[in-house]
Image: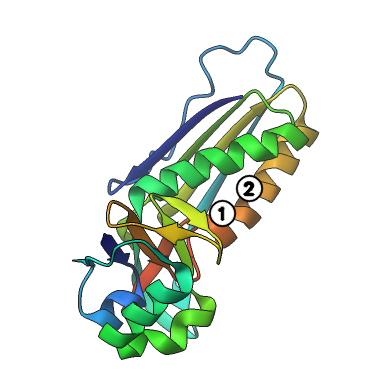
């Protein structure tokens, strides 16, 4: 499986092109995790994320590789934003290409669960509204 | 060795990273030295994982002065 991982302090594009090599791709599953306007019952205007970048990129690649053995997919592109992310903007983007939708849905769901356990990225603080 | 602190552990230690010369030691000894220097870390020990050179390691890991060691508190990405 082709894996592309990116950490960025820039906004994540609202539209992302599917993989250039469509070949056997029959499903392009996209997910964006947005910053909610409320954190722990308080209205907020943004979240600040920090990471251990070298390890976070390695863990993202390792996780995607590991999960693709169980849920065979063709490519995965993951972008995680760092720094201050305003409410309503995406903190994470994942795009999974697969031959059929079932593998893409399964890989994406499993990946997001594992991301929240193993990848060294933190919500550093919430900025009040 | 280079020790990295993240998230609230930066607030506990007052810094993002520190250089320590320890010689070779195991995880328990490393924790002892860290807590002796930064007593506030003690209460987080149970929830913090150690990483050596950007990979998680278990309690049997050994560390040298050439290693980069990170204290990884519970993550919250996504």
Where is residue B38? Give x, y as percent. Answer: 28, 85
Where is residue B8? Give x, y as percent. Answer: 35, 78
Above or below residue B55? Residue B76 is below
The residue that appears at 65% across and 23% down in the rendered structure is A74
Labelled pair 1, 2 in contact (Cβ < 8 Å)? yes
The residue that appears at 26% across and 59% down in the rendered structure is B1
Q: The numbered mark 2 sits on a residue in which chain?
A: A
Q: The numbered mark 1 sits on a residue in which chain?
A: A
The residue that appears at 46% across and 42% down in the rendered structure is A58
Residue carrying label 2: A111
Q: Which of B73 and B25 is in front in this view?
A: B25
Q: Nearer the viewer, residue A129 or A61?
A: A61
The residue that appears at 20% across and 73% down in the rendered structure is B15
Residue carrying label 1: A115
Direction from residue A1 to residue B66 in the image, left or right: left
Q: Which of A19 and A59 is in front in this view?
A: A59
Whether residue A36 appears in this view of the structure is no
Where is residue A47? Give x, y as percent. Answer: 36, 68
Distance Cα–Cα, label 1 vs label 2: 6 Å
Where is residue B42? Give x, y as percent. Answer: 41, 87
Helix, strand or loop for disc 2:
helix
Helix, strand or loop for disc 1:
helix
């Amino acid at each position: 499986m082709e894996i592309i991982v990116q950490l960025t302090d820039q906004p994540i594009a609202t539209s992302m092109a599917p993989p250039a090599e469509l070949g056997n791709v029959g499903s392009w599953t996209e997910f964006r995790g947005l910053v909610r306007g409320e954190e722990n019952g308080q209205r907020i205007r943004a979240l600040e994320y920090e990471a251990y970048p070298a390890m976070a990129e390695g863990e993202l690649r390792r996780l995607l590789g590991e999960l693709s053995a169980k849920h065979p997919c063709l490519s995965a592109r993951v972008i995680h934003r760092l720094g201050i992310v305003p409410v309503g903007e995406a903190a994470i983007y994942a795009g999974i290409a697969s031959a059929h939708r079932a593998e893409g849905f399964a890989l994406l769901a499993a990946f997001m669960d594992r991301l929240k356990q193993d990848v060294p990225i933190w919500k550093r603080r919430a900025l009040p509204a | 060795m280079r020790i990295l602190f993240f998230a609230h552990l930066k607030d506990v230690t007052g810094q993002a990273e520190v250089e320590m010369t320890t010689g070779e030691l195991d995880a328990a000894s490393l924790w002892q030295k860290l807590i002796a220097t930064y007593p506030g870390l003690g209460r987080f020990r149970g929830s913090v994982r150690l990483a050596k050179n950007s990979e998680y390691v278990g309690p049997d890991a050994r560390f040298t002065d050439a290693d980069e060691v990170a204290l990884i508190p519970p993550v919250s990405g996504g």
